[in-house]
Image (cartoon, grey):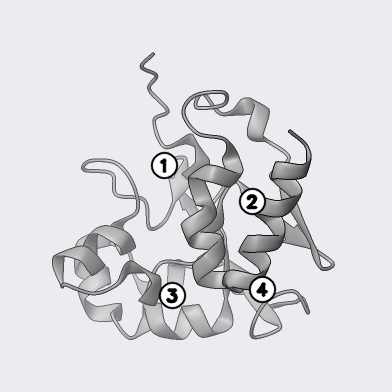
């Protein structure tokens, strides 16, 4: 079955850890040229304290034309991801963690499925949520957490 998601998961912008913002800003000049938007307009400017983030603080990206500022309007997906691949870089070095882990999110030490999963046209297509992002869970949360999640999943069968 085919479906056209139109990158609706990018419609809300995203939360970006402060350390990730620093890495994104290291590509400021190139990104400003690609986006046509000044870096001063990429983030909301409101720093939010949250112990669940690696740096303990994050900011949200702004949205433009119904998408995250970093959405690649010329094709689909994330411009940060595309740029990293074009430069031969690991996209994890520049694209926010929350985007890689979506639709998994977290709150107060709990992993959760995003509230708006039912709104996405890709729901119930392809692999399960857990199976589809297990490599990212391993990358960000480690092998021990990935094994624990897989054990929980397998115990429910």
The location of residue 32, given as percent across then percent down, is 26, 70
Disc 4 is placed on an element classified as: loop
Query: Disc 1 designates what residue?
Result: 65
Between 139 and 66, the residue placed more toward the observer is 139
Disc 3 is placed on an element classified as: helix
In three-dimensional space, the C-alpha distance between marks 2 and 4, rounded to whole angstroms, equals 23 Å
Residue count near mark 2 (Cα–Cα under 10 Å), binned few <14, some 14–19, many ≥20: some
Residue farthest along the right direction in this orientation: 108
For the point 24% across and 58% down, which residue is it? 82
Can residue 147 be seen here? yes
Which image quadrant: the C terminus?
A: top right
Q: Which mark is residue 46?
A: 4
Q: Quadrant of residue 119?
A: top right
Q: Which mark is residue 104?
A: 2
Disc 2 is placed on an element classified as: strand
Residue farthest along the top direction in this orientation: 1
Do residues under tags 2 and 3 come within 8 Å of each other at their CB atoms? no
């Amino acid at each position: 079955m085919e479906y056209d998601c139109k990158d609706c998961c990018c419609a809300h912008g995203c939360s970006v850890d402060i350390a990730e913002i620093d890495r994104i800003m290291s590509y400021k000049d190139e990104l400003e040229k690609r986006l046509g938007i000044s870096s001063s307009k990429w983030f909301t400017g409101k720093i939010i304290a949250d112990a669940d983030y690696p740096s303990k603080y994050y900011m949200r990206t702004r949205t433009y034309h119904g998408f995250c500022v970093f959405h690649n309007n010329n094709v689909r997906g994330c411009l940060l991801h595309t740029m990293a691949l074009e430069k031969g870089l690991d996209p994890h070095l520049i694209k926010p963690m929350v985007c890689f882990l979506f639709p998994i999110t977290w709150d107060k030490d709990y992993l959760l499925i995003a509230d708006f999963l039912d709104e996405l046209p890709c729901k119930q297509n392809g692999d399960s949520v857990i199976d589809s992002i297990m490599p990212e869970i391993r990358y960000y949360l480690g092998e021990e957490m990935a094994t624990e999640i897989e054990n929980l999943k397998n115990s429910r069968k």
